[in-house]
Amino acid sequence: MGDALRYIGVAERRARLALRHRLAPRARVTTPEAVADALLALHGSDPATVYLAVGARLADPAATVAETDRALYADRTLVRMHGMRHTVFVFPTESTAVVHASTGLAVAARERAGLVKDMAKAGAPDAAWLKEVEESALAALARLGQATAAELAREEPRLRERFVYAAGKPYEGVHTVVTRLLRVLGVEGKVVRGRPLGSWTSSQFRWALAPRHAELPVAQAQSELLRHWLTACGPATEADLKWWTGWKVTDVRRALTAIGARAVTLDGGTGYVVEDDVDAVPVPGEPWAALLPGLDPTAMGWQARDWYLAPELRPGLFDYSGNVGPTVWWNGRVVGGWAQRADGEIVWRILADEGSGAGEDGVGGEAKAAIEAEAARLAAWLGPARVTPRFRTPVEKELVS
């Protein structure tokens, strides 16, 4: 009996999510830095996601945009850079070294080799030329502080060099060195995304030099990343960990051993928590609702999602590539979707079975009142801003039509 693994059920997993992801009202925080530290990573592929994810977790979201801008562009306590699965995230700046060494190095090597290979096939200049242009571009970026790709190309005209990619293939195209090179430099941790050209919802941005960071051993960095993520998202299965990190299963297992992770029993099999995280977590004292954006790190946190997202809800809430759209949450599970219409109205729809509201899973009057309050809270801090998710989903498109 003493060797039996502790069982962590759905109710406790939802309680952990509510508290550690700063979604229950009493768990909300006061700064974007506190949000990012709690979650480790905020999806940055859609610029608006970062702000919406922060606003959903602030005790007072009125200053969401100003405070997130401060953290990203003035204080540089948060940084937008490539991370897991070759995806752009926003991380606490002190996590830069860990993210780069744990997930970026292998991807970066492939990206650079791919660019050199594509240029060689097209008869473009060689790797030595590319390295020279790269050094000149980085020097220009240091002088300018921040710059768009076009501004960098004015400083270093060789960045305008064009070459044909995949000649003769259906997807043949013409690439510019600056576009491909900046992508490589981003994955290599040499440059990061800077201020957008327009408002906080803009997908056009400037580039800046990456903050200096130590070069960590890969195994050490992977252990540190896994520990931080499991603290926020544990318990998680080995499959969850492999999917979220993008690592080989051997890397996941080595990191689990290195941090002394503890195995627990889940409804879906064996999961893992950090060594000192086996004690029971109480259910939050009050019921809670949340409106989370597309690609929110909570909705995208695990590969196996049945414990918070019913399979029958997925077709309406995900796009064809597996990107989640805006979701409505009640007591730790997804119950519907939401959208913002052209006039600014926040509209939502319950997709889960409606109940009396008396039980934890009921989507009754109490739930609807709480969701409506969250919709009003969101509309208030958005003000005149209009947000359209980069990755459109069936429910979101229906709600705005």
Image (cartoon, helix red, strand yellow):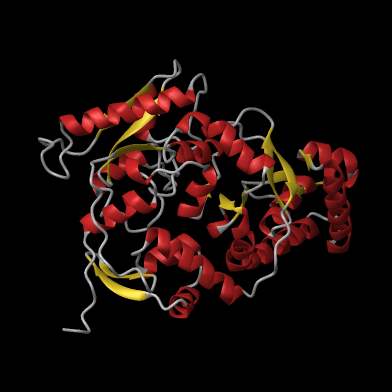
Between residue 1 and residue 124, name the one nearer to us.
Answer: 1
Between residue 305 and residue 99, name the one nearer to us.
Answer: 99
Whether residue 270 is visible? yes
Q: Position of residue 312 (x, y in %)?
A: 24, 45
Q: Is residue 169 left or right of residue 399?
A: right
Quarter of the image containing the N terminus? bottom left
Q: Position of residue 142 (x, y in %)?
A: 84, 48
Q: Quadrant of the rendered structure where residue 279 is?
A: bottom left
Q: Is residue 189 left or right of residue 274?
A: right
Between residue 319 and residue 76, name the one nearer to us.
Answer: 76
Q: Position of residue 66 (x, y in %)?
A: 58, 32
- Total numbered badges shown on the rendered structure: 0
Residue found farthest to the top: 343
Whether residue 398 is visible? no
Q: Quadrant of the rendered structure where residue 205 is?
A: top right
**Residue at 54 percent of width and 59 percent of height:** 84
Q: Is residue 138 left or right of residue 327?
A: right
> In the rendered image of this protein, does residue 383 appear above or below residue 288?
above
**Residue at 84 percent of width and 41 percent of height:** 144
Between residue 167 and residue 60, name the one nearer to us.
Answer: 60
Q: Quadrant of the rendered structure where residue 132 is?
A: bottom right
> In the rendered image of this protein, does residue 325 appear above or below residue 399?
below
Quarter of the image containing the C terminus? top left
Q: Position of residue 168 (x, y in %)?
A: 69, 50
Q: Is residue 80 left or right of residue 137?
A: left
